[in-house]
Amino acid sequence: MSQTMQNARRAGLNTSLAASIVLLVMPCLSTAQDGVSTASAARTRYLGYLGVIPSSQEIAVEDFVNYHRHEIGRPRAGEAVGLDVRWSSDPMSEGSAFLQVGLSTALINDRQDRRSVNLALVIDKSGSMAELNKMTRVKAALLTLVSKLNDTDVLSIVVFDSEAQVLLPATRLANKQIVNSAIRSIQPGGYTNIDAGLSLGYQEALKQYRKDATNRVILLTDGIANRGVTDPDQIANGSLTYNDRGIDLSTIGVGQDLNHVLLSTLAKSGRGLFHFVADAQDIEKVFSKEVQSLLSPVAVEPKVEIEFPRGVRIDQVYGYDPKVHGNKIEIKLENMNSGMTEVILVRFSPRGSSRVPVKVKLTYYDLDQKKQVTKTERTTVSFKGRALEDSSVAKNATIAVLAQAIRDMAASCEAGRTREAERLISAAISAAYHRYPNMEDPDIKRTLAIAETYQRALSGYGRESEPYERSTVPARPTKTAMNPMPTGDFSTGNAGFSSGLRYTPPSKNCLWRMGYTVAPKWNDPLLHRLFITSEEYLAPKRPTGREQVFFANAGGTDSLLLWTAVVACKPNTTYKISFQSVSLNAGREWIPTYEILVGGERSQPQPAGYGKYAEISMLWHSGATSSTTVSIVRMPIPHGGGLIAIANIEMVEVD
């Protein structure tokens, strides 16, 4: 086997969240884009809905600008990848221009035209998949996926919690009713052993391996590995041994409580797409519209080189990790599937020349023709005044600038500069409205809405205090201890977190039924008419005077997710995570017990205080991650009700 063929086998199909230069949009439809990773855009939108600012490392600009389909011409007959190069002057800055490189692959209009599929579904059915209706979403999506497969395709299903088991051995899809019944039977419970599930899924795929077929594992999980092998690199290395034998991997993360680093690492190593599923819109996108993309690779090891005269200044490459060598930009793209479109955008300025010749070269390995392909296009970019404003490039630039501002905003928040973060996002929003006063384009509006969500969240934090600079006095404090959990004092009310309970605004007797509210004190107004007391149950720590309390009627014989949020953290840092809680009912049999969940780890069960607040806490080391999900779970109690108060949720660095 040639070196190129060996590399092609190892490269199979990959769309991770860190890649190269800029992906942008051509005059596009409002429908979802096929064939590229969308995890960052979908997850950032979801976290914005919850009022949570994501880690800057989670925000991939290219995911935003490639979220939808681009109207780029499909490749000519016999070609795997089409190349389209165009440019536009910068409508906001005279003397600058955007170069846009568009790429596309052929559609598969008939399912009989694509390669045969040998697919192993590896489904997380751990207890965390029961939270926020994640398992229901996954099962509905899997039923959709099965309906898109051919009867001659091979499918196997592996499920895992603390252990892994084969639910459906590798078999042809002659009877889809049996497959659908197996999917509907899945019920969550137990811990999460991703490594065991992946290994068993790969073994099933190997049983029906064929060189002329697409051999793939799709992992569906919330990504919290807490049993068996939990180190992302170790899991990825184990996965790579199967990739080297011709089995590829795609990962799909479900819900908020997601180990982004693990799923991203697996996608990079496994040459597969990485998607995030939060709602019906994303489920339809991943499973209804992208079956051909998930299962039909067409080109591997694609690379774009952009060459321009010396003296041209590169102002911005949006997204990715471009390599600049003198007068050449090199962009290693991710492997390409059928039905995909994507674009690359570079903003640059001349030095002493009004017309600049540019050469764009695309190289890739064509899987069908089994040969290396090189395509070249040349154009001349003019910087003389506003010589040309290509409407598609101007649109794409607007989306890219908004996405870049969201990423820069998150980085400023991580550094404790929320005023700067608000200025960055506001400037990008203002520029978008300046370019498009009527704002009718649905694709620009989608990204603009995400940016405006974060703009509102930042303004809600207030200007008196920087949320990432709030400090408390933890056990064994460092001199620079910071609390990266700006909503943990509930000063912004019902914002920045989610809960398994239904929210009710604070009002008289609002906690008569199961649910929660956020209020400064218990008895003004009285939140439950049968629990009359002079005790106000104010937050025990009130350094700003704006602190509020999470009050809930939260009994039940099942575990209950009370509070969960995604927070930024420093890599390789130890944190103390804690909160204060008190049981409000008379009688010790009503006292709840809690667990803290963070980064796939659990605290020891700890009880609430009786009559006064008690602290529940754990120590956690961040490892390589720069963001994590913190959750508070009430363990089962033998009552249908139970009034509780939670306050002062903190995550503080310790020595």
Image (tube, grey):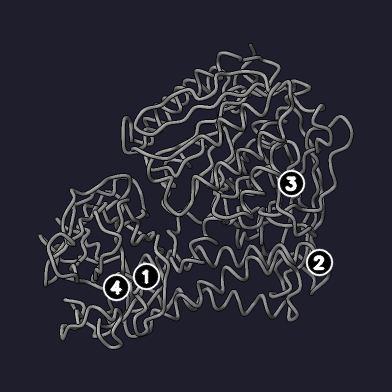
Whole-percent x, y for residue 462 in the image: 38, 83
User: Closer to the camera: disc 1 or disc 3?
Assistant: 1
Which residue is the site of mark 3?
341
User: Closer to the camera: disc 4 or disc 3?
Assistant: 4
Splitting the image into 4 quarters, where does residue 237 fall? Answer: top left
Which residue is the site of mark 2?
391
Query: Under tag 4, what secondary structure?
Result: strand
Residue at 18 percent of width and 68 percent of height: 582
Q: Answer yes or no: do the residues labelled 2 and 3 have beta carbons within 8 Å?
A: no
Which residue is the site of mark 4?
551
Work out whether 374 lies above or below 607. Answer: above
Query: Under tag 3, what secondary structure?
Result: strand
Q: Amino acid at mark 1?
A: Arg
Q: Amino acid at mark 3?
A: Thr
N-terminal-most mark, 2 or 3: 3
Q: CA distance from mark 2 to mark 3?
A: 18 Å
N-terminal-most mark, 1 or 3: 3
Q: CA distance from mark 1 to mark 3?
A: 50 Å
Work out whether 50 lies above or below 247. Answer: below
Q: CA distance from mark 4 to mark 3?
A: 49 Å
Whole-percent x, y for residue 28 in the image: 78, 58
Q: CA distance from mark 4 to mark 1?
A: 12 Å
User: Closer to the camera: disc 2 or disc 4?
Assistant: 4
Splitting the image into 4 quarters, where does residue 445 fall? Answer: bottom right
